Image: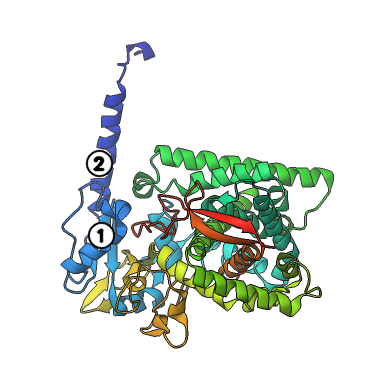
Amino acid sequence: MISLQDLPVLSASTVSTIILLLVGTYTIWASTGYRFSANAPKRLKEGYPIFGTLRFFTARWDLFQHAKAQTPSGNFSFFVGKHPVIGLTGEKARHVFFQSRDLGFTEGYAVLFGQSPNTLKTKPGEAIDTDQKFAGPGGFFIKRMTHMISSANFGRNLPKLLKDTRFRINELDQNPTGITDPFESIYMIVYQLTMRMVGCDDIADNQELLMKTLRYYEKIDSSATPIAVMYPWFPSPAVVKRTYAASRLYMIVNKIVEERKKTGVKGDDPLQYLIEQGDSMFRIIEFIIGALFAGLLNSGINAAWVLTYLANDSHWRQKVLEEVKTVAAKYSTNPSAPLVDQLDEVPFEAWESEFPLIDLCLKDSIRLQALGTAFRKNISTKAIPVGDGEVIDPGAIATYHLGDVHLDPKIYPNPTQWDPSRYFPEKAEDKKVPLGWLGWGVGRHPCLGMRFAKLENNVIIAYFTAMFDYELTDKTGKPVQGTPDVDFNGRSAMKPHVHPYVKYTRRT
C-alpha cells in the first residue's frame, strides 16, 4: 500500500499548471458542442481558444465600436469562455432585443454574471430554468419586490426615508471642512435608504452594521471576474470571496431573525414581511442581496453623479433650487421656516411627481453613466431574425451596449456632455428614434425599481440643495472646472477613477 508520505510534493507552479490544463481541456471539450450557424453575424477575428474575447471584460465599449466597424451589418459573434455571444447594434436589432418573447432576460444575465442557471429537461427542445422560480416573471423576487415598492409601502415608509436623509445631511453640516466626496457620502445615503426599503431596520439604524454589510455587498459585486463568469464551478479567489461575503451577510441577517423569534418582538420592515411569508433564510438573503444589487449599484452612483454635475453647473443648480423652493412653498404651513425644514411637509405624491427638473438631471446622468451591456438568451428552439438575413441562434446569448444609442451623436449632439435640457419638449432628443432612451428598461423588461430610484434621488438632491450652496472642488476645496471623465468601458454605472469633491456652505 502507498502511504501519503510516498506521494510526490507538488510545487505551487506545478499545481497551477495542472489546473490550467484541466480548465483548458474542459473548455475545449465543452465548446466543441456549439457552432454558430451560417446565418449568425460575422465572427470576430480576435480572442483566445480557452478564454474567448477578453476585451468583453476589459474594454467593452471599445470592443463594440471596433466590431461594429468591422462587420457589414454592425452585428457580430464571439465566445466568452464556452458561451456563444452575439453582439447587436442598430435600430432593427435593438427592437428585436428588447421586444422578442423568445429572448430570456433571466437566462442571459445568469450566465454572464457567473451564475450559470440549472435547467430541468422536460422533453426535447424544452428547458425550464429553475432560476425562473426566483427571478423570472411571476417568480419569488418579482412578487416580493412588487409588494415592497407599492404606493402603500412607499407612503408608509416616507417618514423614515426623510428622517434618514435629514440625519445624513445634518452629519455633513457638522463636518468642519465643508467638503465631501459624493461617491462616499451620497452613495451611503442611497445604501441606507435602499436597506430601509428592501432590507431591515436593524441594519439601516446601525451605522456599524451598515458599513459592514456594505463592504460585504461590494465584495459580492466585485466578484464577477472573467474567471468567475466563464468557469463559475472553479473555486477562483473571486468565487471564494463571493461565497465568504454572502455567508457573512447570511449570519448577520440570521442573527436578527433569531433574535426576533427569541424575544417575540416583530419589526415593521421588509425583513419581517419576508419572515411572515414563511420564506427560508436562503431565500431571504438571496432576495436582499438581489434587491440591494438592483437598487444600489446604479442608483447610488447616479445620485452622486447628479450632485457632481450640479456642483459644476451654476445654471442648473439655480434651476433646481428654484424648483425646490416652489414645491416647499406649496406645502409648507410655515413659510418663514428654513427651506430644508419646509421640505419635511412635502407629501409622498409630490415627491414622486413635482420635481421634473431633478428628474431630467437624473435622466441625462443615467444616459451617460448606465452604459453597460444588456443581456438576453435565445431560449427557443428557433433562430431569431435581427435583420439583414442574420439571426440569433438557439442557445446563444445576445448582448446590446446601451452606448449604441445613448452616445449616438445623430441622436444626442455632443453626446458626452451632461445636458438635462435635451429632454425639453422643443428638443426631445430621446424621441428622435424608437427606443431612443433605455435608462429604465423598455419593452418586456422595464425597471421594477424605477419609482423608488426616482424618489430617493429627488429626496437626496432636494434636501442637499435646500440645506447648502455648493460647488465642485478638489479635495483641498479649490474650485475646479469640469467633471471627471466617464469610463464608457465599464460594465454598469461606475464611480470615476478620480473622485470629485463638493464644497458646501449652509444656506442662511
Please state which of residues 402 and 266 is positioned toward the viewer in this rendering.
402
User: Residue 363, how many percent across, how many down?
Assistant: 48, 72
User: Image quarter for residue 380?
Assistant: bottom left
Mark positioned earlier in the residue sequence (1 or 2) = 2
Look at discs 1 and 2 and give the one toward the viewer.
Answer: 1
In-image side of 492 versus 38 (left or right) = right
Amino acid carrying mark 2 in the image: Gly
Report helix, strand or loop for mark 2.
helix
In-image side of 339 versus 187 (left or right) = right
In-image side of 77 versus 430 (left or right) = left
Q: Residues within 10 Å of mark 1 (few under 14, many from 20)?
A: some
* Residue positioned 63% across, 53% down in the render: 284
Please state which of residues 339 and 243 is positioned toward the viewer in this rendering.
339
Q: Residue 63's mark?
A: 1
Which residue is under mark 2? 24
Amino acid carrying mark 1 in the image: Leu
User: Image quarter for residue 150?
Assistant: bottom right
* Residue positioned 72% across, 45% down in the render: 256
User: Residue 247, how many percent across, how many down?
Assistant: 57, 41
